[in-house]
Image (cartoon, helix red, strand yellow):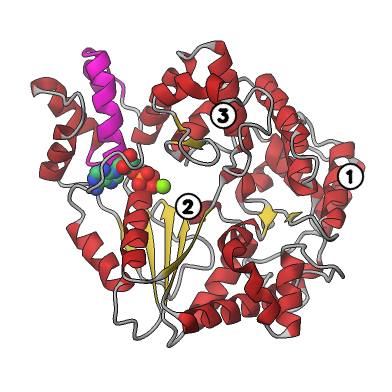
């Protein structure tokens, strides 16, 4: 789906606003938060902004939140700063140490310090922008881990005259935590009816007459829905009548389409696609996990569910990943998590996370592994620590209400309590140990990753 059409339909106002941000003069640092429904076109607009930024001579640092990494502290920041990690050595010593601590790259581990990490990010970005204009682009910010979001928001609020532009995109119409204030927002509206029609005209099987009206009505200006519903109605002209009869929210309708396409694949392709959904990482190449081969995934590529022309397999849209993940029964998902864990033994945080996801109940042994992974991640050669979501927030809290933790896991849960929304940006706040229990509770809640 992504990259299908080189030029976008409509969105002139949005494009010119983005162009204004990423082209000279860069008098002061600027930020913009793109909000909108799944499929509204946030990712393509960010990509277009990045393309224009590059051609205007900007350096681009980009990262995208992933559902599976939202509990790994500083995973997003690590992704963003990976190309410039050599600059960390040039930071003031304590800031460099904090940043290395956050990424667990330190020879001599220090407890993570959120305030110093935020300052280090600010110094680093500001230094980079001294060399030339810089675009920081964060997609799917709703899935960035809270520690990374806090550090980014902290830095972005303090940028002044730097030639730096921060673009973030997030699902829904509410900014992610930390970005509620001080950040201009752009909510992507539905495409106008004429633009929706233009997008339909570009489809390989553009619907006609009644079918076209039904697609336009159902999709309600959502580009992803226009594209996917056109495919469905081309294959099954009666589908439109059923849509009118069953009022289903659009995201649910799109998920059902992806699920049906997944269910129609041959067994080996389904198994491979589930592994890709479970791995949820472009870093995990097809060679790393047995069963996740390009050959096995080929039918899924032909069905438009995944792209294989990228370094690691990449779902055509996060909704596809989510639909595939939830279409599989728990036992199959758990087996896939164990298989992926087996390929990640050198990454204690992810290894523990996948084992936890495979556990039906909060499990003493897994809680202990998660605790160990937090300790191990402090050693050189490993990168990040699994860290809980904030207390009382999100599916982790729901999971906690639903299941009684085992003794040790319960102890961990208690220890991490009481973190407010900005507890991280306070000296010493991050000295708290990660909470194995809360993470386990989050991953055993089977509905937790449903598309929002
Ligand atoms: N204005 C547009 N013109 C043409 N195609 C679009 C437009 N906006 C989105 N698309 C297509 O719709 C699909 C969903 O867009 P995407 O950017 O992934 O949405 P989001 O990131 O908001 O979920 C992609 O295939 C994308 O290429
Ligand atoms: Mg997107």
Residue under label 1, please give it: 368
Viewer-closest of 301 and 446 = 301
Give yes or no for contact between labels 1 and 3 (Cβ–Cβ under 8 Å).
no
Q: Secondary structure at mark 3?
A: helix
Quarter of the render that holds ligand 1: top left
Please say whether residue 356 is one of the residues in the magenta stretch: no
Frontmost residue, 411 versus 45: 45
Residue at image position (53%, 63%) is 177
Q: Quadrant of the N terminus?
A: top left
Q: To which residue does mark 2 refer?
A: 140
Tally of marks? 3
Please check the rendered image and state whether residue 228 is part of the magenta-colored stretch, yes or no.
yes
Alpha carbons under labels 2 and 3: distance apart: 18 Å
Q: Are marks 1 and 2 in contact (CB under 8 Å)?
A: no
| Disc with the residue nearer the chain's start (2 vs 3) | 2
Spot occupied by residue 49 in the image (x, y as percentages of width and height): 33, 61
Q: How much space separates mark 1 and mark 2, taking CA atoms?
A: 31 Å
x and y percentages locating residue 436 in the rendered image: 81, 48
Residue behind mark 3 = 325
Which portion, as a residue range, is magenta?
220-246
Q: Is residue 14 above or below residue 68?
A: below
* Distance from mark 1 CB to nearest ligand 2 atom below 8 Å: no
Mark 1: secondary structure = helix
Helix or strand or loop: what does disc 2 sit on? loop
The reply to whether the residue tagged 2 has its Cβ within 8 angstroms of ligand 2 is yes
Between disc 1 and disc 2, whose residue precedes?
A: 2
Q: Is residue 36 visible?
A: no
The residue at 52%/27% (across/down) is 324
| C-alpha gap between disc 1 and disc 3 | 26 Å
Q: Could one spot residue 273 in this view of the protein?
A: yes
């Amino acid at each position: 789906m992504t990259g299908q059409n080189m030029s976008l339909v409509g969105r002139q106002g949005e494009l010119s606003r983005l162009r204004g941000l990423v082209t000279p003069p860069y008098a002061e640092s600027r930020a913009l938060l793109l909000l909108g429904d799944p499929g509204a076109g946030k990712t393509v607009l960010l990509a277009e902004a990045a393309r224009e930024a590059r051609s205007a001579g900007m350096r681009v640092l980009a990262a995208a939140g992933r559902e599976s990494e939202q509990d790994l502290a500083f995973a997003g920041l690590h992704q963003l700063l990976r190309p410039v990690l050599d600059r960390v050595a040039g930071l003031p010593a304590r800031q460099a140490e904090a940043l290395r601590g956050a990424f667990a790259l330190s020879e001599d581990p220090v407890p993570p310090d959120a305030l110093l990490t935020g300052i280090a990010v600010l110094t680093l970005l500001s230094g980079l922008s001294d060399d030339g204009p810089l675009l920081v682009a964060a997609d799917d910010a709703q899935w960035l881990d809270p520690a990374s979001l806090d550090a980014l928001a902290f830095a972005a609020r303090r940028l002044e005259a730097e030639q730096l532009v921060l673009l973030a995109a997030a699902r829904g119409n509410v900014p992610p935590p930390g970005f509620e204030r001080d950040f201009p927002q752009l909510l992507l509206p539905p495409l106008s009816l004429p633009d929706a029609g233009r997008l339909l005209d570009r489809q390989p099987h553009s619907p006609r007459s009644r079918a076209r009206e039904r697609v336009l009505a159902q999709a309600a200006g959502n580009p992803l829905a226009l594209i996917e519903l056109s495919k469905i109605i081309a294959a099954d002209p009666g589908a439109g009548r059923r849509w009118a009869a069953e009022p289903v929210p659009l995201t649910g309708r799109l998920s059902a389409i992806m699920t049906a396409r997944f269910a129609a694949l041959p067994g080996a392709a389904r198994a491979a696609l589930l592994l890709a959904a479970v791995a949820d990482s472009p870093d995990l190449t097809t060679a790393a996990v047995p069963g996740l081969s390009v050959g096995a995934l080929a039918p899924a590529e032909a069905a438009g569910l995944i792209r294989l022309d990228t370094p690691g397999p990449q779902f055509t849209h996060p909704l596809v990943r989510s639909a595939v993940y939830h279409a599989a029964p728990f036992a199959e998902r758990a087996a896939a998590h164990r298989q992926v864990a087996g390929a990640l033994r050198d990454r204690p945080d992810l290894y523990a996370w996948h084992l936890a996801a495979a556990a039906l109940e909060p499990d003493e042994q897994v809680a202990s592994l998660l605790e160990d992974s937090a300790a191990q991640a402090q050693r050189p050669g490993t990168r990040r620590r699994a860290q809980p979501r904030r207390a009382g927030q999100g599916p982790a809290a729901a999971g906690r209400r639903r299941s009684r933790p085992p003794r040790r896991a319960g102890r961990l849960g208690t220890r991490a309590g009481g973190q407010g929304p900005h507890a991280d940006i306070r000296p010493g706040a991050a000295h708290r140990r990660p909470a194995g229990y809360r993470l386990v509770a989050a991953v055993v809640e089977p509905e937790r990753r449903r598309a929002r």
